[in-house]
Every structure is written in C-alpha cells, then in structure tokens.
Image (cartoon, rainbow, N blue to C red):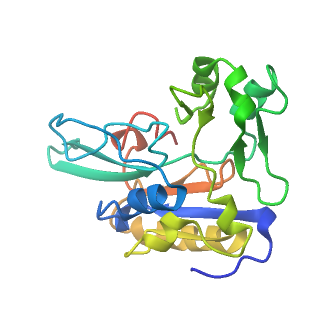
Amino acid sequence: MHTTVNNKNDIVKLIDVTKCTACRGCQVACKQWKGLPGAKTKQTGTYQNPPDLSAQTLKLVRFSEGLKENGKPFWYFFSEQCRHCIEPPCVDTIAGYTPDGATKDNATGAVLFGPKSKEAPFEEVRTSCPYNIPRQDEKSKVLVKCNLCIDRITNNRVPSCVLSCPTEAMVFGERDAILDKAKKRVEFLKQTYPKAQALNADEVRVIYIVVDDPKKYHQYAVA
C-alpha cells in the first residue's frame, strides 16, 4: 500500500508483527533518512541491537523470547517507534512548561517535538507517555522521537521505514482503508491465534497487530 495519501489528516501506519523477519531494514532506513549516527553498543546476550531507543535511534526492532503458557518457546519481533497518539499526553506535558515545545501537526496528525522541548523536564515527559518513547539528546537537551517522516508524507511519500520493509509488515495510508485491512488480517490470524488483535486502533496513528499478550513483545506494548 505504498500509494499517495490524499487525506493527510486521517492517515495511519499499520505494523503487522507476524510479517516481521527482524531484518531491521526499517531501523537502518530511519537512520539513513534522518542522518542519524550509529550507536556504540555492546553484546548483552540478545540479537537486539542497540539495546534501546535513544536520541540517535528513533526506530528499533525489539527482540523478545520466552515460554508460552503451554511451555512452547516464542521469539517475537516488535518494530518500536512513537505511536503518534490521537490525544498525545506528551504534548500536553511539554505545553505546561513551554507552549512551543511540541505540537500535533494539523495537516497530518503527526506528533512533533521542537527545540524548545528542552525546557520541559525530560523524565516527566517520558513517563507521561504510555509507551515510554521520548528520549533526550544529551548535548542539546532537546527531546526527540519519530516524527512520522513528516517531510516525506507532506510530499506524498510514505515514511522511510515503510518503504524499506521487504515483507510489507508495515503499510501506510488513509485510516479507513488501513483499519479495514487490519480487521481482515486479525480475523484471518484468529483462526490460528485466538489472541490476535490490533492494538489501540482508535487511540493512535501507529497500530500494531499482535497474536499474543502484548507484554510478551515488551513491557510497554500495551493493549
């Protein structure tokens, strides 16, 4: 669904984790498009790398493994990023300190942080987000996160991570079309995975399809 989006004020991204192979093309594409440097990391006993989001890593494929209730192992991948909430609590928190520090773009709905976001207490902003997304640049103190590739979508281009995905685990388009696609996909997956669901479809612009307890993907993957 790499198509022109006519109604930019009602757009969403769908991430179907069942199609993700953890190639991390989305992670690399995000860095390339935004000109972000690589992060120095160390081996922590997992294939996930780097270990978390940061001012240099706004898109991260999380790896999670363990045992299901029936004793069978699972290994899940979760392409983490800002959810671009319809009613973003982070914007309200920042606005309490500096009204020009963050906004929800009227044309696209993208949640954006600006240079003045550094005037808001980082930990208060981070904890106001139910998904633990905001991070802070150590040098500038500006708060950062995914901006939904607003420079691309306002020019009728899909986000770089969507464009890079070889399995179409990520698709982007108008809400009604994407929600219909999500509904059909969940109905299909429920035949094999009764717990399949689309997370928070009415609350965010980045919707995930999962097939198990969301917290098995990581602790902030809330239903």
Please indicate whether residue 24 sits to the left or right of residue 35 in the image: left
Vertically, is 95 above or below 182?
A: above
Q: Name the one closer to the observer, 59 or 176.
A: 59
Q: Name the one closer to the observer, 48 or 174.
A: 48
Please indicate whether residue 75 sits to the left or right of residue 62 in the image: left
Image quadrant where one finds the N terminus: bottom right
Q: Splitting the image into 4 quarters, where does residue 115 fall? A: top right
For the point 36% across and 47% down, which residue is it?
Answer: 38
Work out whether residue 148 can be spotted: yes
Q: Position of residue 6 (x, y in %)?
A: 78, 77
For the point 69% across and 32% down, which residue is it?
Answer: 90
Q: Position of residue 91 (x, y in %)?
A: 74, 34
Q: Position of residue 81 (x, y in %)?
A: 51, 48
Please indicate whether residue 26 sits to the left or right of residue 40 in the image: right
Q: Splitting the image into 4 quarters, where does residue 159 fall? A: bottom right
Q: Name the one closer to the observer, 197 or 116.
A: 116
For the point 81% across and 27% down, which residue is it?
Answer: 95
Work out whether residue 89 can be spotted: no
For the point 72% across and 73% down, which residue is it?
Answer: 155
